[in-house]
Amino acid sequence: MKRIGVFVCHCGSNIANTVHCEKVAQVAKDFPGVVLSTDYKYMCSEPGQVMIQEAIREHNLDGYVVAACSPRMHEPTFRKCAARAGMNPYMVEQVNIREQCSWVHANKEKGTEKSIDLLRMGVAKVVKNEPLYSTTIPVTKRSLVIGGGIAGIQAALDIANAGYPVTLLDREHTIGGRMAQVDKTFPTLDCSACILTPKMVEAAQHPNIELMTYAEVEAVDGFVGNFDVTIRKKARYVDFDQCTGCGACTEKCPKKVPSEFEMELGMRKAIYTPFPQAVPNKPIIDAKHCRYLLDGKCGICKKVCPTGAVDYEQKDELIVERFGAIVVATGFEQFDISAYEEYGAGKIPDVITGLHLERLMNASGPTAGKIKRPSDGKVPEKIVFVKCVGSRDEAKGRPYCSKACCMYVAKHATLLKEKMPNSKSYIFYMDVRTPGKNYEEFYARTQNEYDAQYIRGRVSKIFQVGDKLIVRGEDSLLGRPVEIEADLVVLAAGMDPRGDAKDLARTLGISYDQHGWFTEAHPKLQPVETHTAGIYLAGACQGPKDIPDSVAQASAAAVKAAGLLSKPELTSEAMTALCDEAICSGCGLCQSICPYKSIEIKSINERYHGQMRQRRVSNVNQGLCQGCGACTVACPSGAMNLKGFTNDQILAEVDALCQR
Amino acid sequence: MSAVDNPKQPAKEWEPNIVGFACNWCTYAGADLAGLSRMQYPPNVKLVRVPCSGRTNPQFVLRAFQKGADAVLVAGCHPGDCHYATGNYFTRRRYLLMQRMLEFMGIDPRRFQARWISGSEAPKFRDVVTQMTEEIKALGPNRKLREEI
């Protein structure tokens, strides 16, 4: 029988308040195999760890159980503690009597009883633990950044500057993302393009960065350090090696389409670059609208191209590349305001969103920076802003705050006053949230120096009378209804996850929350990691963020990725599947169930009744196996087992739980 | 037969004993979150941590009933969200079948449940555990499959 130690943690008062820790430790003394059972105030503290290490040596322990917080929290701590005392780290089991006991059961007697049951289970398991050893796997020293917005660009630059090659991938045919659409940035009011475009160019020219625009991730195989990513390079119908970006084709193209970049306030051609500072600054053909590609008539761009770069025959191309780390920076979508019918959203042309206003303000936008109403081109005087459209609204399924809207509305009100001193902005708000450096000061200036009138309350209805928009709402501070005759209404639309974020999450094997934002491994302590090792998050794909936050998170993700790439090799999972060749029948069921393609059928030679014969058996690649255990259940002969979670161990746990 | 048809009047302080198999990435994390959020639920469900709900062999479920569990819960990530890509699809198929088989053997289907609880669904974890405990309390102790001790 193995010699087992039991250590019960009080976690200060977190556990001890609702569990009799001394009693638990006392009862555990009688469990089979237990030679030492004790309790202590903080097992994870330095003195606690030293106590465990001394006990391991003094009592010659083969394994130990610590009853404390969740193993998801401190299992690595206690494994390392064992290793320091010369014990195999996998001879440790942690029993969760905090998250799943003391914190959820106020009744001390019942909590103590459950703690004892859980501890009995832990001891029953650890008796059957075997020492495990991990192997090493190589690291591909390249990183993939998905999404070329400001977060993706920053992450790519930081990884590249750390000395590792980066592929920066964007589904659009230019990098820049949402920030490229923005006119000015708060709270400094510096022009967005002026600070973004140098970064775009830097990324394009960096020797360690390969730009891969107009491309999408199709599939991801492999695991940390060695992801095999299938990328679809969409057909651009323009050979970029030949194209000089002269723009003759765009000029002559007869087909006009509403420009997505300009929020459909302006037009673009079917062969186009979305905006003048695009990187790469070469046009592509939009196959959905090109006359030649649709019905074979036209072909003007090909005729006018001086270098013969237009190629109507180009096809999508699938490539597979291997990366060690992946940074996901796919950003957000603006909330679709048409859900707010009471605001006439999507029906009244002069009810627009924040991004529309950005384009109207921008000097290179569709109105060359003149604020004109979309309906009749009139210059508006009274402008009403409605905040929290698609944010903090349970009825629309968006209970979260979109974080940036309060500040961008203040920015818009300031800029409108600067551009049009006779204009007046009215801002309907629920709360004004301005946590951020110099944000509150900016908001105060908007009110005091730029004459914006903040009205606390929701808008109930917006409708057209003549060429005016009547905004009806309530001033909840004065407790009376208000009605404003406005020329233009701007809905401060919140942020939504990308419509296809969930598909990407499934492709990558990362998780997302109920709204579709990607989830981080820990909300406080692992804000850029995902639950999948080697995949990191940056920017608004993880939740609404403004530019400074996105950049900060991108740099954090880059450090994590570079840290991973800097390792000469990785330690593989030690808790992997193992086949007992003696009873394996070679049926191959495990092979088809394995999601990591880590099982192969091999031939072994064995002596059978005095003769040599060949037999087929399963073989698990220990580097590829991630330890899910699917194969163990599929195996009809019980040959497949999962180290660390063997059939024997789990059955012993079940027995222990039922034994009372 | 008699033990099933005329279950002994449960002792006054009889509490159901429920064995739960929770996948490490979703349900176990959801249970941890319930703890962090200080939600209160009955202590009858005790979780066995498994890497994936797909690791739960039907043999473990049968063993639990055999050794005296009054109910068994298998819980993992929502289909489509498996940490190991496909594990919980197999769980789903396997336990749809398993539940019918147990019913055929005379075990009330409420005594065996497979649920999907994500790492952020602490309230759902609390509700599933609470509801299951109440149901099993009403059903009384399980006698089927049970080894006489």
Image (cartoon, coloured by chain):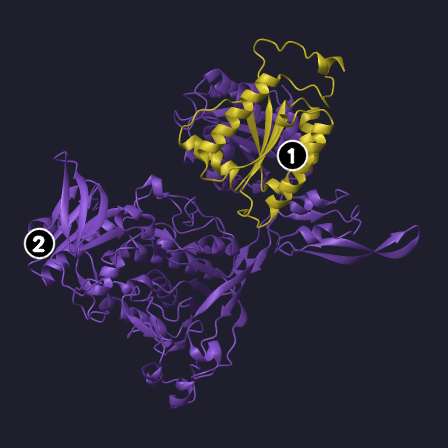
As drawn, is A94 to the left or to the right of A541?
Answer: right
On the image, the x and y values in percent for residue A33 come to 64, 27
Question: Do badges 1 and 2 share one subunit?
Answer: yes
- The answer to which quarter of the image holds residue A196 is bottom left
Density class for disc 1 (Cα within 10 Å; few <14, some 14-19, many ≥20) is: many
Q: Do the residues labelled 1 and 2 touch (CB within 8 Å)?
A: no
For badge 1, the amino acid type reads: Ile
The CA span between labels 1 and 2 is: 68 Å
For badge 2, the amino acid type reads: Tyr
- The foreground one among B82 and A486 is A486
Which mark is nearer the camera, 1 or 2? 2
Quarter of the figure with the N terminus of chain A: top right
Name chain A's colour: purple
| Res A650 label | 1
On the image, the x and y values in percent for residue A466 come to 17, 55
- The answer to which quarter of the image holds residue A455 is top left
Q: Name the residue under label 2.
A: A450
Vertical comparison of A503 with B68: above or below: below
